[in-house]
Amino acid sequence: MTAVTTAKTVLIAPDKFKGSLTAVEVAEALAAGIRSAAGATGMPAGVRCELLPLADGGDGSVDAAVAAGFTRRSCTVSGPTGQPVQASIAFDGVTAVVEVANTCGLGLLPHGTLEPLDASSRGFGEAVLVALSLNPARIVLALGGSASTDGGMGMLTALGFTFRDSHGHILTASGRTMKAVSSVDIRPLPEVAGTELVVASDVSNPLAGPNGAPAVFGPQKGATAADVAALDQGMGNLVAALAQDGTSSVAELAAHPGAGSAGGIGFACLLLGAHQVSGADYFLDLLDFDARREPCDVVITGEGSIDEQTLAGKLPAAVARRSGNRMVLGVAGRSLLPRERWADLPLDRVYALADYTELDSSRDPELSAALLRRIGWEIGQDIGQYGGRHPAESAGTGGSPGAAVR
């Protein structure tokens, strides 16, 4: 087949591969492979790669915003167990992006030791304070990756709330102290009321109960069955104390879908007047996906695992749905969807790192990057041969990548 001589533009728009590579690193590795293949095929006009690392409102949201043109602002905040940590927010003059993961997330726990009862969300609130000092029109609150299950008590403390026990003593915010809250002084900063607060999340869990934050997410943060029961009881006590001290509709907010996100930080955000939007689509709009997609012939997206949850509306599905009639390729650490389900996303082809190695790449950044470069090279070869048209009948099954890496 005659090689294509018209320049092709590829938009590489992945989410992170959690535990392995950031979205930026995924995009860069794929681009390196594509460029090497384009050179090898001798395409006169070559292939131009546009990189748009993405996030869905969880961890990696600040990095994705910075990669899209926002300015990074560094700040020092309290980590999940109170130790100072260097965090960052993103700001473009209008919108600030603040995330839990780089302020008080699981990855910041000293020595990786889980603290299901004592971790706090205070650092996230301190980062919000830094964002407020920039006078933004809105703040996007990215809630993924939290280490705490404190109902957002730490965040609220940083923003002007005071929690006291039955003796009037001020409490240090944590999951452990929720059960001791007897009264709340509700005096949030006036700047909070004057700023649009947006929770970009697709979590639908309420604050407490069988589907609440302690029961569903607590075990991931090290909570035992007894811890889950204590945290759930503490959530109920926190809600009761807030209601007693005049917060209107607090019970309704606690039951609201998404209140249980990030160990209950979603509940605290709702108390402050935040509104929740679909994380995937909101970030695609925020990072100007539609405009970046327009001149491109091929779109590549992906995440650590492409599976049934992806079909439910996670970021790769949103990217594919908004890519029009362009060829859309998926890349993942693993794919649990059979070939006949690819069109449901819709994706033209899925490349999975697990098909190229017998090793576990999910915790091996170097191996993941090497495999992504190899996949990028294969994609570049296909683009060189097919010019960005759908290779459905000729590109193979995607399940026979050649010699495995061992």
Image (cartoon, rainbow, N blue to C red):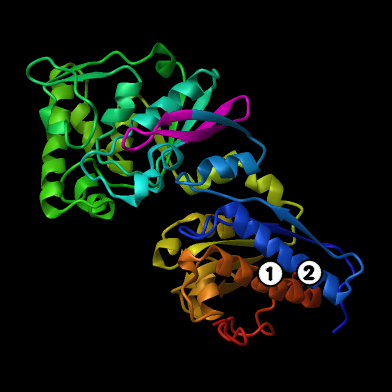
The answer to whether marks 1 and 2 mark residues whose Cβ atoms lie closer than 8 Å is: yes
Label disc, if present, on residue 176 of the rendered structure? none
Q: Residue 180, percent across and down?
A: 11, 28
Note whether residue 326 is visible: no
> Toward the viewer: 61 or 29?
29
Residue ID at (57%, 56%): 319
Amino acid, disc 2: Ser
Which residue is farthest front? 111
Residue designated by label 2: 36
Residue designated by label 1: 376
Residue 43 placement, left or right of 159 = right
Crowdedness near tag 2: few (<14), some (14–19) or many (≥20) residues, C-alpha within 10 Å: some
User: Could you tell me what secondary structure mostly forms the magenta stretch?
Assistant: strand
Q: Earlier in the sequence, mark 1 or mark 2?
A: 2
Q: Residue 381, percent across and down?
A: 76, 76
Q: Is the residue 168 above or below the residue 296 in the image? A: above
- Quarter location, residue 231: top left
Residue 199 placement, left or right of 179 = right
Q: Residue 26, percent across and down?
A: 60, 59
Per the image, is 85 magenta?
A: yes
Q: Quadrant of the N terminus?
A: bottom right
Residue 186 placement, left or right of 28 = left
> Toward the viewer: 305 or 356?
356
Amino acid, disc 1: Gly
Per the image, is 328 magenta?
A: no
Q: Is the residue 35 above or below the residue 189 in the image? A: below
Note whether residue 256 is visible: yes
| Magenta residues (range) | 76-98
